[in-house]
Image (cartoon, rainbow, N blue to C red):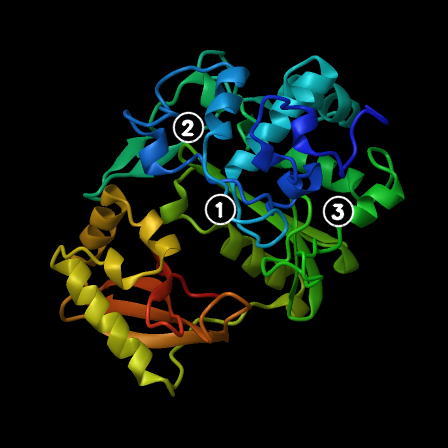
Amino acid sequence: MPGKISLDDSITKYFPDAPDTWKPILIKNLLSHTSGLSEYETPERTGPNGPFNFRLDYTEEELAKKIEVLPIEWAPGEKWDYRNTNYVLLGIIIHKIAGMPYAEFLGQRIFKPLGMTSTRLISERDIIPNRAAGYEMDRNGALKNQEWVSPTFNSTADGTLYFNVLDLAKWDEALYGTKLLKLSSLDLIWNVYPLNDGKPNPAGYRFAWMIGAQDGHKRIEHGGAWQGFTCRISRYPDDSLSVVVLTNLEAGRSNPGVIAHVVAGLVNPALTVPKLETIADDHPEVAHRLKKFLGEVASGADVRPETTPQVASVIAADTSKRFQHSLATLWPGGTLTLVRRDKGVEGQPQWVSTYRLSKGGDAMLIVFGVGADGKISVLGPMPNREYQ
């Protein structure tokens, strides 16, 4: 589609009936997750009473209209936050310009030319040889099949693709040359997108890639999670190494990113990932605050008043109960030890701490941070793991 779209186009060019507040949002804001648009994929919005009920089908026009009434949370380019909403809109734009759904366009322009014969749109109805099943764990730790969603939500551009390792190897190889994109376009992808103040966004994000480093070596990567599957591709271009990890277990129970990083270290010792081992805690007041918070969660108290609005928004009823359930065997009575502490980036607390909570043979990790206003602004319970 040469010349048919510009990164500097306002998205109202493609959504002419959108509110005036959309006019400053550019294509590059959608690509870099700096648009300020709200996340459509929240428990409240995708539940039975929400505007994006996962069990119902919608047309692309209906999805766009529903997104148009979502609040804008910050001015375009002012902040970064990953929002699936951005890529839903990008897929709709592809359809408008190319005259075909985004997955069909990718098939014609990328998958077929590269020989990626197994990569395609998700379909639970089609018979697909060697298809893996996605799994989730319920609150009692029992393995379950992935929850069903309507075909609509397996066709949007915020993911929804089947692929395998061999096809991703072909994709990775193409990114080292100019078979798909010219060099100037690749240069745009491999540099961190700046915010309005000229500083790189805190996630090191550009256009669908996170740009960072592992022990001083450049690392370009991205992950995904959907319906009982997780994945990660981590590319180390200066080391001519790429690692792809695919799992068929939900994100809360699998760590494809950690696996990818550790495997890279096994292949190249210069990329060895440090272990999460107990370190001295020179800010014990943070652990004291976390212990108080854990007690409140374990007792079923409403902890949202103690958090920032951003953290409170993700402590939906089911999430809070799931966290409470995971704490049942660990707190009270568990041991809390510090295993990592990082200086917070702009917009975060001064320190972001990672603790291991353990009791008997059970353990979990909790990423935790308290802002200058005393509100909990970083909260991330996750499965226990050995490596950073």
Residue that carries the numbered disc 1 in the rendered image? 73
Question: Which secondary structure, mark 3?
Answer: helix
- Mark 3–mark 2 contact, CB under 8 Å? no
Q: In this rendering, is residue 328 above or below 133?
A: below
Q: Is residue 56 visible?
A: yes
Which callout, 2 or 1, points at the residue further toward the start of the chain?
1
Extreme left residue here? 299
- Assess disc 1: are there few (<14), some (14-19) or many (≥20) residues with their C-alpha within 10 Å of its C-alpha: few
Q: Quadrant of the N terminus?
A: top right
Q: Residue at x 26, y 74 (%)?
A: 289
**Which residue occupies the foreground of this view, 381 or 75?**
75
Residue under the point 40% across and 35% down: 228
Q: Nearer the viewer, mark 2 or mark 1?
A: 1
Tag in front: 1 or 3: 1
Q: Which mark is residue 189?
A: 3
In this view, the residue in front, 301 or 241, is: 301
Task: Characterize the local packing of mark 2: few (<14), some (14-19) or many (20 or more) Cα atoms within 10 angstroms.
Answer: few
Residue at the image point whose x is 61% and y is 46% from the top: 76
Q: Position of residue 382 (x, y in %)?
A: 36, 56
Q: List the residue tagged with mark 2.
A: 133
Amino acid marked by disc 3: Ile
- Of residue 66 and residue 220, the one placed in the foreground of this image is 66
**Element type where label 1 sits in the image:** loop
Q: CA distance from mark 3 to mark 2?
A: 32 Å
Say which label, 3 or 2, has the lower sequence index.
2
Residue 121 in the image: state x and y as whole percent.
57, 21
Q: Amino acid at mark 1?
A: Glu
Residue 270 occupies which quadrant of the picture? bottom right
Single out the mark in the foreground, 3 or 2.
Answer: 3
Q: Position of residue 187 (x, y in %)?
A: 82, 49
Q: Is residue 123 left or right of residue 334?
A: right
